[in-house]
Image (cartoon, rainbow, N blue to C red):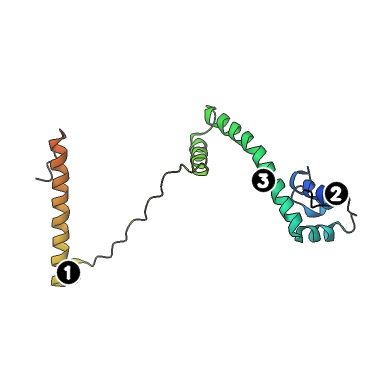
Amino acid sequence: MDDLTEMQCAFVLAYVRGPGTAGNGTKSAVAAGYSAKSARVQAGQLLAKPHVMDAITREQRKALSGLSSVAILEAEKLLTDPATAAGTKVDLIRTILDRGGLAAPKEAAPKEKTEKPLNEMSLTELEEFIRNGQEQIQQLQKQRAGSASEGHTRSPLVN
């Protein structure tokens, strides 16, 4: 925080980590040594300065970096504690995997049916509908025939 005055530096530290002042500009300004009468105005001015905001962001990152080890330890305790509810464990696992970039891919949204009722279809649409159905049946038969040749039993529903 070389680019800050001593009071600005004290403000940044109070704003990020100060007990009872963290996140509160006015209280942080008072803790940094600014007058209580002008603290609100001073805090607004300080928070408007790009170099002060940059210092706050850097300090927040440092604070989070230090807390990440604690968070990992606490997560491990929760996951191994038999008293932790199963739902809590599942949510924690999902969050950890997601943050680690290991989350399962999201399922594609199901396609909406846009088919008309059969009695409203034209002859061409009915023929297309029947062709699609026949193709699906053939694909299922091929899949089941492949499974049967691998030692799996065939379903009696499809010959």
Residue that badge 2 annotates: 6
Q: Are marks 2 and 3 in contact (CB under 8 Å)?
A: no
The residue shown at (16%, 57%) is: 133
Q: Is residue 47 above or below residue 121?
A: above
Residue 61 numbered mark, or none: 3
Numbered label tally: 3
From the viewer's side, name the closer residue of 36 and 2.
2
The residue shown at (64%, 34%) is: 70
Residue that badge 1 annotates: 125
Image location of residue 21, percent across then percent down: 79, 47
Calculate the distance from the C-alpha at mark 2 to the C-alpha at mark 1. Answer: 78 Å
Residue 81 numbered mark, or none: none
Q: Is residue 17 visible in this depiction of the protein?
A: yes
Q: Amino acid at mark 1?
A: Glu
The residue shown at (76%, 55%) is: 52
Helix, strand or loop for disc 1? helix
Helix, strand or loop for disc 3? helix
Q: Amino acid at mark 2?
A: Glu
Label 1 crowd bin: few (<14), some (14–19), many (20+), radius 10 Å: some
Tell me where residue 113 sits by quadrant.
bottom left
Q: Are marks 2 and 1 in contact (CB under 8 Å)?
A: no
Helix, strand or loop for disc 2? helix
Q: Is residue 82 left or right of residue 33?
A: left
From the viewer's side, name the closer residue of 149 and 87.
149
